[in-house]
Amino acid sequence: MRRALLTLGLSVLVAACSPGGAGNGPAGGTEPRRIVSLDYCADQYVLRFADRQEIAAVSPDADARFSYMRARAKGLPQVRPRTADILILQPDLVVRSYGGEPGIADALERAGVPVLQVGFPTDISEVRAEVRRIGAALGKAREAKALSDAVGRRIGRIAKAPSGAEPELLYMTPAGVTSGPGTLVNDMIEAAGYRNFQTRAGWNPLPLERLAYDRPDVVAAAFFESATNHVDNWSAARHPVARAQLAELPVVPLEGAWTSCGGWFLIDAVEALAAARGAPV
């Protein structure tokens, strides 16, 4: 209780002293923008569209191996997604996807700091719309539209397989999960010209029972390039049936950074999958 009261008091004090003040958004004054990003999904958009001098801090994962924009994050201050730590930086905009404790967005808004929420796209068209929306909010509407359009053109260049003759693909991570219909990964698989081996909607454990008697044509292995995404020894990916897929079938390695968040960079994964199928990209 005492800690909560101290945090609230600090929040109010910092908000009162902040250059933006309550109700003044990032476009409201003459001071330079001070943007804080709370998680690595938000980091990607901030690092792509905000000028470096506008970035007050990024998340501790901004330069991690699974962060697509990690090179641009080098040397930038990092902050943990805690209200008091954020307010001390006196931001005039906070960008977040999932970062911070429950209610952090409301707490920041009450302190006078606007919060730009990055969405969770479930298909490529939603990703392109999110690129345009977040890019415009960060002052780069024209650049964001150009990036969104480039993704569309690259998707359009991928030659499709004949209907009904698409090879089956299983998406696999070291954590032992795969992705079915209704997910962004599923849309990527189909955009690359494959049928998804996983028919159960959403994110699920690898279908080990089915894999014991049925196999896909190819495996897309994501996040295997690093130790991230490993859960524990109980991961389904450690099962002999799952290991057999990696050992005996064609495998397309996918950088974890391509699929860890819903962003324009997913096109790299789509093109890698299409190239493995022999389609021009």
Image: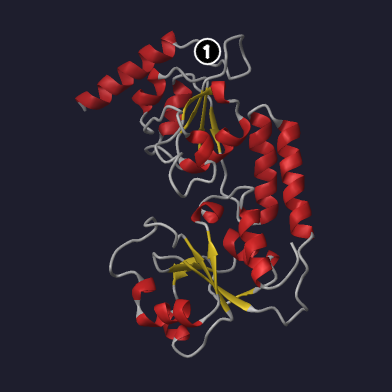
Q: Is residue 12 left or right of residue 5?
A: right
Tell me which residue sits at (49%, 22%) in the image: 113
Q: Can residue 195 be seen in this view?
A: yes
* Residue lying furthest bottom: 213
**Which quadrant would residue 158 be assigned to in this image?**
bottom right
Q: Return the residue nearer the eye: 17 or 170.
A: 170
Q: Return the residue nearer the eye: 53 or 202.
A: 53
Q: Is residue 12 left or right of residue 36?
A: left
Q: With respect to residue 137, does 224 lie above or below?
A: below
**Which quadrant would residue 208 be assigned to in this image?**
bottom left
Provide the secondary structure element on which disc 1 rests.
Answer: loop
Q: Name the residue under label 1.
A: 20
> Could you tell me residue 242's position as x and y percent?
41, 78
- Residue type highlighted by circle 1: Gly
> Could you tell me residue 25's position as x and y percent?
58, 19
Q: With respect to residue 39, does 248 lie above or below?
A: below
**Which quadrant would residue 225 be assigned to in this image?**
bottom left
